[in-house]
Image (cartoon, grey):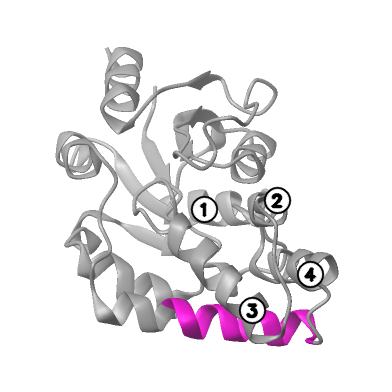
Amino acid sequence: MIRALIFDMDGLMIDTEHLYWEVGRELAREHGKTVSDGTLRRMMGRDRLASSRIFAQETGVPLAPEAVMTQREEKMLERFNRGGIEPMRGLREILERFHGRLRLGVATSSPRILVEAALPAIGVDRYFDVITAGDEITSGKPDPEIYLKTMSKLQVTPETTVVLEDAPAGAMAGMRSGAHVIAVPSPLTAQEDFSQVAKMRVNDLFEAAEQIERTLG
């Protein structure tokens, strides 16, 4: 019996991945460098410091990974505060459908300050029983810590939990936690292979909701 549903945030609930790519290109440009799509794609869904380490190593910017992380997050917060971020297709519908029926949680690599800016901006913060942010854990995705911690807060077990993820690293974290993973790729991860890290792959959150409903039935 499924008792809980845990959502990733960036690229799964909110259309923010293109903003991270924009920020990455801007940060590289400020230091006279360029960043490839391959680098930006490898950064997606990972622990915030690990992503920043990939960026620093592959672009050659003269910054420590910690400085890259800080500057990326400052630039993202500026964009969030300017408004204009949009929920992914089907988000409000899936939340309305399962709110009150399942325990709902968020497990995101983004820091708490970005979560607290983003979720209220699209009016969905009220749906969630718990939120675990990337600056509240020791080991980020693809390590399962964030999902195990979120399940503990929700007081549920992995075998009764569904995880929704849009990136392979996040899906791997969910799989390693023992949860049932449904991959919901964003336009930027649509070409990725989820076959080894997710029980199923769907096109959007509408389809994810239908699959969860079948499991509950």
Q: Mark 3 points at which residue?
A: 29
Residue 165 versus residue 112 in the image, above or below: above
First along the sequence among labels 3 and 1: 3
Q: For the residue carrying disc 1, how many other residues have a C-alpha within 10 Å: few (<14), some (14-19), or many (20+)?
A: few
- In front: label 3 or label 2: 3
Q: Which span of residues is magenta-colored? A: 63-76
In the image, which disc is placed on residue 42? 2
In the image, 64 versus 196, the foreground residue is 64
Q: Nearer the viewer, mark 3 or mark 1?
A: 3
Query: Of helix, strand and loop, which one carries label 3?
Result: helix
Q: Earlier in the sequence, mark 2 or mark 4?
A: 2
Residue at x 28%, y 26% (from the top left corner)? 209
Q: Earlier in the sequence, mark 1 or mark 2?
A: 2
Q: Quadrant of residue 71?
A: bottom right
Q: What residue type is labelled 2?
A: Arg
Q: Mark 4 points at which residue?
A: 59
**Dot 3 surroundings within 10 Å: few (below 14), some, or many (20 or more)?**
few
Identify residue for label 1. Answer: 152
Q: Disc 3 residue type? A: Arg
Which element type, helix, strand or loop, lies under badge 2? helix
Q: Is mark 4 on a helix, strand or loop?
A: helix
User: In the rendering, at what x and y percent does residue 27 appear?
Assistant: 61, 79
Residue in the picture at 59% in, 56% down: 146
Of the numbered discs 3 and 4, the one sitting upstream in the chain is 3
Q: Distance between the residues labelled 2 and 4?
A: 13 Å
